[in-house]
Image: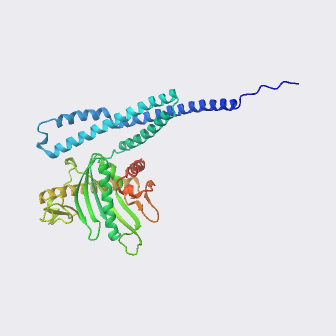
C-alpha cells in the first residue's frame, strides 16, 4: 500500500503567492512613487525658472533698502506701493521655497514608509503628495500670468443687467463673492462707488482689489454672469433668469500715459446715496465724470472730500480708457489673424439654484455643485480653469 503523502500545512501555497504579490505590488508602488516624485520635482524646476527666484531675491533686497529709508512715508502712496510690493515678493519666495522643501521631504517620508512597512506613514505620504500636487497646480497658474498688465492690481465693475430686481440682487451677490474671495486671500479692497437699487441689491459698483496679479487673475471673470432661481421677489414663486455684467480693469500707472483733455470731460457733483458713515450723505461730495468722446461714465462717492472723489474717479476713467485702447489694439491683431471677432468675454458663467444646484463656466466646462460656496468666495477653481483656458487659446 502506497503511503499517504504528508499533509501540507493548510493555506501555505496561497500565503506564499500572496506574499509574492505583495512584494511585487510594493516594488510597483515604489517605482510609481519614484516617477511621481521626479515629475513633481521637474514641474517645480519649471516654475522656479519662470519665477526667476534669483532676480526676485535681488528685487527684494532693493525694496528692503527703500523700505528702510527714513523718508519712506513722506510720500504715503509711494510708500504703500513699496511695502505692498515687498510683502508680495517675500511671500512668493517663501511659497516657492516651502513647496520645494515639501517635495524633498516627500521622498524621505515614502522611504520611511517602505523601510518600516507602515501603512499609516504611507497613507500620510500619499495624502501629502496629493496636497503638494494641488499646490503645484496653483503655483503653475501664477506662471501663466505673463500679459502686459497681468501683474497689476484690479478694478472691478459690476452692473445689474436684464432681470429687474433679481438682477440687482444678483449684482450684489457677485460683489460680495469677489470681496469674500479677496478677504480669504488676505487682499486689501476698497469700494469706490455703489449705486443701490430701490427695492433690493445694487445697480452698479466699482471696487479695487489691491494685490499684485489680481488683474491677471480676475480678468478671466469679465463677461456676463447668469443666475437661474426661484425669485424671492416674485409672489407667485416663479423661476427667474437674471443677468449681471462684470468688467475687470488693470489699475493705471504713471507710465501708461493716457491723455485726457479736460475739455472732453463733464463733471457733475451730487450727494452720496445709500448707507454711509456720519457726514457721508450731508454734502455734495460725490463726483460723476463723463468722458464725452467715448460716453464712458465713472463716479466715486466713498470719500467725504469732493477733491478726493474726483481724483479717484479720474483714476477709474484712466483705467477704462487704457482698457479701451488695449481692446482696440487686440481687435486689430484679431483681424490680422482672422480671429473673426470671437470674444470669450460675453456670457461666461451660469449659476443655477433651481431646479438643481450648479455653477458652470460656459467656456471651460468647469462646474461645481455648491453655489453657496461659490457665492461665499470659493472661486479659485474657476479662476484656474479660466487662466489655463485663455493661455491655451493664445497658442
Q: Look at the image and tell me whether residue 342 can be seen.
A: no
x and y percentages locating residue 380 in the rendered image: 37, 50
Q: Look at the image and tell me whether residue 62 can be seen.
A: yes
Q: Is residue 68 left or right of residue 392?
A: left
Colour pattern of the rendering: rainbow
In the image, residue 127 above or below residue 185 = above
x and y percentages locating residue 106 in the rendered image: 44, 32
In the image, residue 112 above or below residue 180 = above
In the image, residue 258 above or below residue 282 = above
Q: In this view, does 196 lie to the left or right of 70?
A: right
Residue under the image location 53 percent in, 34 percent down: 32
Residue under the image location 66 percent in, 31 percent down: 15
Picture quarter with the N terminus: top right
Q: In this view, does 65 lie to the left or right of 57?
A: left
x and y percentages locating residue 86 in the rendered image: 23, 39
Q: For residue 294, what is the image quadrant?
A: bottom left
Q: Which of 275 and 343 is in front in this view?
A: 275
Amino acid at each position: 500500500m502506497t503511503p499517504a503523502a504528508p499533509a501540507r500545512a493548510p493555506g501555505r501555497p496561497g500565503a506564499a503567492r500572496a506574499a509574492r504579490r505583495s512584494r511585487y505590488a510594493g516594488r510597483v508602488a515604489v517605482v510609481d512613487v519614484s516617477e511621481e516624485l521626479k515629475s513633481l520635482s521637474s514641474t517645480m524646476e519649471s516654475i522656479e525658472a519662470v519665477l526667476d527666484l534669483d532676480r526676485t531675491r535681488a528685487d527684494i533686497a532693493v525694496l528692503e533698502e527703500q523700505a528702510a529709508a527714513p523718508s519712506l512715508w513722506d510720500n504715503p502712496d509711494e510708500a504703500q506701493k513699496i511695502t505692498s510690493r515687498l510683502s508680495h515678493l517675500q511671500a512668493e519666495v517663501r511659497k516657492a521655497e516651502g513647496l520645494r522643501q515639501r517635495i524633498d521631504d516627500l521622498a524621505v517620508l515614502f522611504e520611511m514608509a517602505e523601510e518600516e512597512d507602515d501603512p499609516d506613514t504611507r497613507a500620510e505620504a500619499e495624502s501629502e503628495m496629493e496636497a503638494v500636487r494641488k499646490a503645484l497646480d496653483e503655483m503653475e497658474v501664477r506662471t501663466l500670468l505673463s500679459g502686459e498688465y497681468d501683474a497689476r492690481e484690479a478694478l472691478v465693475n459690476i452692473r445689474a443687467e436684464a432681470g429687474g430686481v433679481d438682477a440687482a440682487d444678483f449684482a450684489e451677490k457677485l460683489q460680495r463673492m469677489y470681496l469674500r474671495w479677496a478677504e480669504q486671500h488676505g487682499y486689501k479692497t476698497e469700494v469706490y462707488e455703489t449705486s443701490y437699487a430701490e427695492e433690493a441689491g445694487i445697480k452698479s459698483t466699482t471696487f479695487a482689489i489691491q494685490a499684485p496679479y489680481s488683474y491677471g487673475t480676475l480678468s478671466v471673470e469679465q463677461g456676463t454672469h447668469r443666475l437661474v432661481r426661484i425669485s424671492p421677489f416674485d409672489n407667485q414663486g416663479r423661476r427667474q433668469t437674471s443677468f449681471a455684467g462684470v468688467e475687470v480693469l488693470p489699475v493705471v500707472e504713471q507710465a501708461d500715459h493716457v491723455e485726457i483733455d479736460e475739455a472732453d470731460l463733464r463733471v457733475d457733483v451730487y450727494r452720496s446715496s445709500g448707507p454711509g458713515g456720519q457726514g457721508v450723505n450731508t454734502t455734495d461730495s460725490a463726483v460723476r465724470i463723463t468722458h464725452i468722446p467715448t460716453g464712458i461714465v465713472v463716479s466715486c462717492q466713498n470719500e467725504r472730500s469732493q477733491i478726493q472723489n474726483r481724483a479717484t474717479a479720474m483714476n477709474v476713467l484712466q483705467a477704462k480708457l487704457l482698457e479701451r485702447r488695449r481692446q482696440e489694439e487686440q481687435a486689430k491683431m484679431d483681424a490680422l489673424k482672422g480671429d473673426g471677432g470671437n470674444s470669450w468675454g460675453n456670457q461666461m458663467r451660469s449659476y443655477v439654484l433651481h431646479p438643481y444646484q450648479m455653477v458652470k463656466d460656459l467656456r471651460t466646462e468647469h462646474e461645481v455643485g455648491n453655489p453657496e460656496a461659490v457665492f461665499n468666495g470659493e472661486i479659485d477653481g474657476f479662476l484656474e480653469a479660466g487662466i489655463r483656458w485663455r493661455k491655451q487659446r493664445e497658442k
